């Protein structure tokens, strides 16, 4: 099979990205990649190079998109910073279940699989995690400035905790824990933050979805 008419490189990359997210680097063959992208082997190699290079391209594109998406959730004025941290947890709880194929994060998949075929891929994953942690830290600091989180609490440590909860909920979702249970985990994690007395007095219970799976 040659290159199809109207070949759209971005769409092909996204389709192949989902294949890597579904079966991992080691579990994805060149034939799997070609089928997912709707390309013949010759067109695949001509457009993207070998499997390792294609994985790096799809991983980089995924990281770019993920960093932008989380920054959009977390950036904003000080007065709504606490609500944005809660939104981060809620979105984390629903991340896998909101995907029609129940695919997890490509970054998490890379780390769990232990892919070490390319130091560039390893560095890109580390960069993505640093950038997301940076967005979280800035949001935590904004909540502290507004008086919603205790000022003496370590912003970096809170950010790392939230990232650990994010990754843990993804793994539990992949293992079969339903969305409603994960939202309760998100609520418990939020309540465990070093909220000030003023912030706790303003909190109201968040409605939990009833779409248990």
Image (cartoon, rainbow, N blue to C red):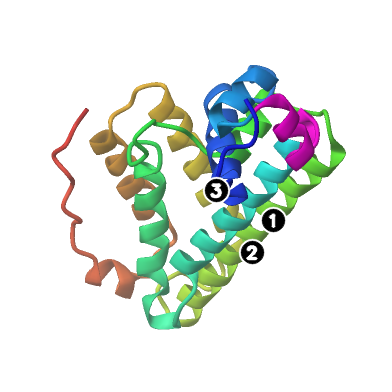
Q: In percent of the image, x 32 and y 37: which residue is there?
A: 182
- Label 3 or label 2, whichever lies nearer to me, is 3
Quarter where residue 172 is shown: top left
Q: Count the marks: how many?
A: 3
In the rendered image of this protein, does residue 81 appear above or below residue 132? below
The quarter of the image holding the N terminus is top right
Residue furthest right as drawn: 119
Helix or strand or loop: what does disc 2 sit on? Answer: helix
Q: Residues within 10 Å of mark 3 (few under 14, many from 20)?
A: few
Find the distance from the CA under tag 3 to the CA under tag 2. 39 Å
What is the distance, in whole Å, between disc 1 and disc 2 at their CAs? 6 Å
Q: Earlier in the sequence, mark 3 or mark 2?
A: 3
Nearest the eye: 83 or 120: 120
Residue beneath disc 3: 6
Magenta-tinted stretch:
40-53
Residue position for label 2: 134
Q: For label 2, count other residues whose C-alpha is less than 10 Å away and answer few (under 14), some (14-19) or many (20+).
A: some
Mark 1 — residue?
130
Instruction: Please tell me whether the stretch drawn in magenta is mainly helix, strand or loop.
Output: helix
Residue at the spot 44% in from the left edge and 82% down from the top edge: 77
User: Quarter of the image containing the C terminus?
Assistant: top left
Relative to 102, is 152 above or below? Answer: below
């Amino acid at each position: 099979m040659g290159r199809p008419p109207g070949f759209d490189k971005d769409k092909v990359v996204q389709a192949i990205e989902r294949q890597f997210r579904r079966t991992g680097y080691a579990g994805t063959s060149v034939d799997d990649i070609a089928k997912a992208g709707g390309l013949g082997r010759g067109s695949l190699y001509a457009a993207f190079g070998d499997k390792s290079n294609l994985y790096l391209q799809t991983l980089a594109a995924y990281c770019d998109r993920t960093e932008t998406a989380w920054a959009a959730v977390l950036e904003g004025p000080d007065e709504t910073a606490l609500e944005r941290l809660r939104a981060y947890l809620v979105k984390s709880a629903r991340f896998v279940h909101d995907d029609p194929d129940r695919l997890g994060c490509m970054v998490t998949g890379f780390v769990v699989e232990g892919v070490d075929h390319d130091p560039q891929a390893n560095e890109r994953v580390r960069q993505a995690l640093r950038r997301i942690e940076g967005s979280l830290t800035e949001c935590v600091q904004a909540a502290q400035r507004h008086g919603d989180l205790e000022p003496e609490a370590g912003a970096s440590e809170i950010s790392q905790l939230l990232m650990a909860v994010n990754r843990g909920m993804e793994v539990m979702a992949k293992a079969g824990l339903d969305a409603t249970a994960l939202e309760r985990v998100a609520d418990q994690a939020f309540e465990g933050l070093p909220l000030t007395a003023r912030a706790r007095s303003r909190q109201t219970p968040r409605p939990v979805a009833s779409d248990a799976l």
